[in-house]
Image: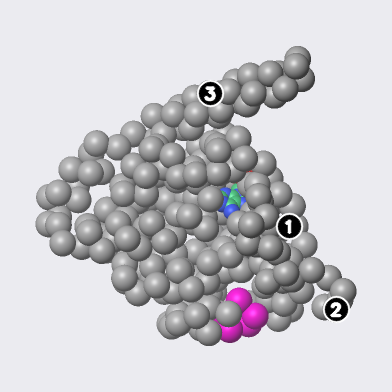
Amino acid sequence: MNPNENHAEDIPTDHPRYLSLKHRHKIIEGMHNLVVAEAGLIAHGRGECFDYILSEKTNKFAKKAIKTAVALMLLAKHPIISVNGNTAALCAKDLAHLSSITQAQLEINLFYRKKGRIEAIKKLLENEGASRILGIEEDIMVEINELSSNRRRVDPNGINIADVVFVPLEDGDRTEALKKLGKKIIAVDLNPLSRTSIWADITIIDNIVRVIPQMIEVCRELKKKDKKSLKTILENYNNKNTIQEALNCIIKYLKSQKSKAFNILEN
Ligand code: ATP
Ligand code: MG
C-alpha cells in the first residue's frame, strides 16, 4: 500500500462526512488486501449516491423490511448468508455475529474470483469470529444452470440446498437465478430500482453498514417469539410497497433539497 495514502484513522471525527469517508476507506483498504475487487469500488460509489438521496438513514420502510427479513431467516429450514468482497470489507464482524445468532452459515460467493481473494475474505471473516464458512472448497462446488457468470458455482452444502438466501449487495442476474430455483431471497440494496431490488422477496433499501447491526438487534427480540407471530410478520409484508415507499422517500428528499438549494441560490 502507498504509505502516503490516507487511512481511515486519519479522518477527523468532526468531518461532516466522517462516516461516509470511513466506509470509503474500508473499501479501499479491502481492495489493497485482495478482499474487494476493483469493480467493488464502483459499486460502492453507486451505493453512496443512493444513500445520499435516501438521506443516509434507516427509513421506516427499511425497518419493516429488516424485521420481516429476520422473521423469514428464523423460520427457514436452511438459511444461508451470501458474502462478497464489499460486504466482508464493510461489516465482517457483524456478519459473523448475525451468522451465529440466526444459525445461518456464511457462504463466500464472488463474481471476480482473482487468485487469493477467497482466502483473504475467509481470513478476514474468521479473524472477526466467523466459523464453518462455506464456498471455500473449489472441487466440491456445484453449478446453477441459470447463470453463466462465475457466481453460478455454489456450495452443495450451502446455497444449493438453502430455502432462504440472504444476499446483501447482490447482482441482479444471480438474484433472478436464485429466485427461479425457488429460493426465498432477502436483499440489501440502496437502489430501489435495481434488478436485485425488484426480484428479491424482501428488499432492505438501506446501507449494509446500518442494516446488519439492526438485524442482530431485531433477531434478539424475535427469537423470543413463537412461529405463529413470525409468520404473521411475513403475512403483513408487501415488497412492492417497500419499493414504492423508497421511491416516494427519494422524491420527497430531492424536492426538499431543491428548495434549500434554491433558497441559497436566489439570495
Ligand atoms: P443489478 O445488477 O441488481 O441491476 P446494478 O448492476 O445496478 O444492480 P451492481 O453493481 O450489480 O448494481 O451492485 C451494486 C449494488 O449495490 C447497487 O445497486 C448499489 O446501490 C448497491 N450498494 C453498493 N454499496 C452498498 C451499500 N453499502 N449498502 C447497500 N447497497 C449498496
Ligand atoms: Mg448488476
The reply, left or right, for residue 132 in relation to residue 229 is right
Task: Say what secondary structure mark 2 lies in.
Answer: loop
Residue neighbourhood size for the residue with mark 2, other residues' Cα within 10 Å, grouped as few (<14), some (14–19), many (≥20): few
Mark 2 near mark 1, Cβ–Cβ under 8 Å? Answer: no
Locate residue 243, reporting x and y percent.
46, 32
Locate residue 111, reporting x and y percent.
66, 62
Residue holding disc 1: 41
Q: Main secondary structure of the magenta part?
A: helix
* Magenta region, residue range: 119-123
The verdict on residue 120 being magenta is yes
Residue holding disc 3: 252
Task: Say what secondary structure mark 3 lies in.
Answer: helix
The structure residue drawn at horizontal position 58% and vertical position 65%, both measured from the top left corner, is: 90
Q: Amino acid at mark 2?
A: Pro
Mark 2 or mark 1: whose residue is earlier in sequence:
2
Residue neighbourhood size for the residue with mark 3, other residues' Cα within 10 Å, grouped as few (<14), some (14–19), many (≥20): some
Q: Nearer the viewer, mark 2 or mark 1?
A: 2
Residue holding disc 2: 3
Q: Nearer the viewer, residue 234 or 267?
A: 267
Locate residue 169, reporting x and y percent.
56, 54
Locate residue 6, reporting x and y percent.
79, 68
Mark 3 or mark 2: whose residue is earlier in sequence:
2
The colouring scheme, among rainbow, by chain, secondary structure or one colour, is: one colour
Q: Nearer the viewer, residue 239 or 143?
A: 239
